[in-house]
Image (cartoon, rainbow, N blue to C red):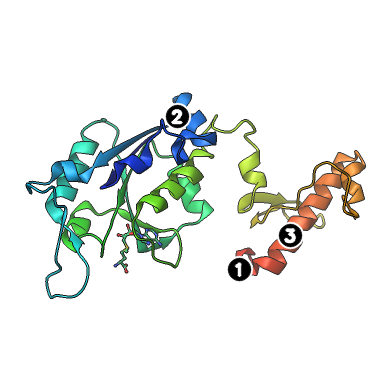
Amino acid sequence: MRIDILTTFPELFSTTSPAVLGVSIPARAIKANILSVHATDIRAFTHDKHSKTDDRPFGGGPGMVMMCQPVWDAVLAAEAQDQRPATRILLTPQGTPLTQKIVEDLATKPRLLMLAGHYEGIDERVIEALDPIEISIGDYVLSGGELAALVLIDAITRLLPGATGDQLSPQQDSFGNVTIPPQSNKHQPTTQRLLDCPHYTKPRDWQGREVPPVLLSGDHTKIAAWRLQQRMQRTFVRRPDLLDE
Ligand code: SAM
C-alpha cells in the first residue's frame, strides 16, 4: 500500500527519525515494503512569495482558512507520482467517526491520500472539488489533521498482510469480528464485534492477585470458552452499543 499525506508539516511523517512511523509495526512494514508513506508539503505549491497557504476568512471572524490553489495543486502533484488511483481522505472533526470497520475497508485499498487541515480548516470549494471521504478520529478538535492522519496510518498498517507477526491478532483485539458458536442445534453461528478479554503474564501471583486458574489449566478448549465469555461480558458492561440485538 502507498499512503500520501498532504500537509504543511511534512516533517511529522518522517520514516527515518524515531517518531511514529520510525518505530514498531509501521517501521517494520515500511522496511518490508508492505507500506510506503510519502508526505507532500502543501507550502511547496503556493504561488505566494512568503509561502502562505492560508488567508483570512471571507465574512470576517477569527482564524485563517487554507486556500484552494495550493491544496489542489499539491493533491494533483502527489497523485501523479503513482499510477494507482488514490482513495482521497480528508481528516476533519466533521467527518464520519472512525471505526475498526472503516479501518478494515481502507486497509484493502492499494493507495490512500490523506489531507490534513490546519487553522479554521480548508476552503470548502476545494473540498467539494476533491470530493474526499471525510473522517473524524473523535468528537474533539485537534489543532491540525496530522495526528489524526498518523492515527489512521497506524490503525491501517497493523491490518496489512505481513505487517504483524501473528495474523490472527487483529481479530482477537477489541472490535475484531468474532464468530460466536450457536447455543443449540436450532441456532446458527453469529459474528459480533467484541472488546478484548483481560490478559495476564508472569508472575502467577502479584501482590496477592492471582491469575485466573483456567489460564493455567492447559485446557485450550476451556481457555477459549473463558476468553469468549470474558469478551462478551466486557462488551455487554462497557460497550453495549456494539452488541447486535
Ligand atoms: N473549524 C474546524 C471545525 O470546527 O470543524 C476545526 C479546524 S481544526 C482546528 C484544524 C484541522 O485539524 C482540521 O482541518 C482537521 O484536518 C484537523 N482535525 C481537528 N480535529 C479533528 C478530528 N477530530 N478528527 C480529524 N481531524 C481533525
Check disc 1 and give the amino acid type: Asp
Identify the secondary structure beneath mark 1: helix
Q: Is mark 2 within 8 Å of ligand 1?
A: no
Looking at the rendered structure, the secondary structure element under dot 3 is helix
For mark 2, does the 10 Å Cα neighbourhood hold few (<14), some (14 to 19), or many (20 or more) residues? some
In the image: residue 206, left or right of residue 166: right
Q: Marks 3 and 1: CB-CB under 8 Å?
A: no
Residue at x-position 35% and y-position 60%: 143
- Residue 241 has which mark? 1
Q: Give the side of residue 27 with respect to residue 125, left or right.
A: right
- Select label 2 or label 1 by which is in front: 2
Residue at mark 3? 232
Q: CA distance from mark 2 to mark 1?
A: 36 Å
The answer to whether the residues at label 2 and label 1 have Cβ atoms under 8 Å apart is no
For ligand 1, which image quadrant applies? bottom left
Measured from the top left, where is residue 61 in percent x and y?
A: 18, 75
The amino acid beneath tag 2 is: Ile
| 2 or 3: tag closer to the N-terminus | 2
N-terminal-most mark, 3 or 1 = 3
Under tag 2, what secondary structure?
A: helix
**Residue 102 screen position, x and y as percent:** 47, 52
Q: Which mark is residue 30?
A: 2
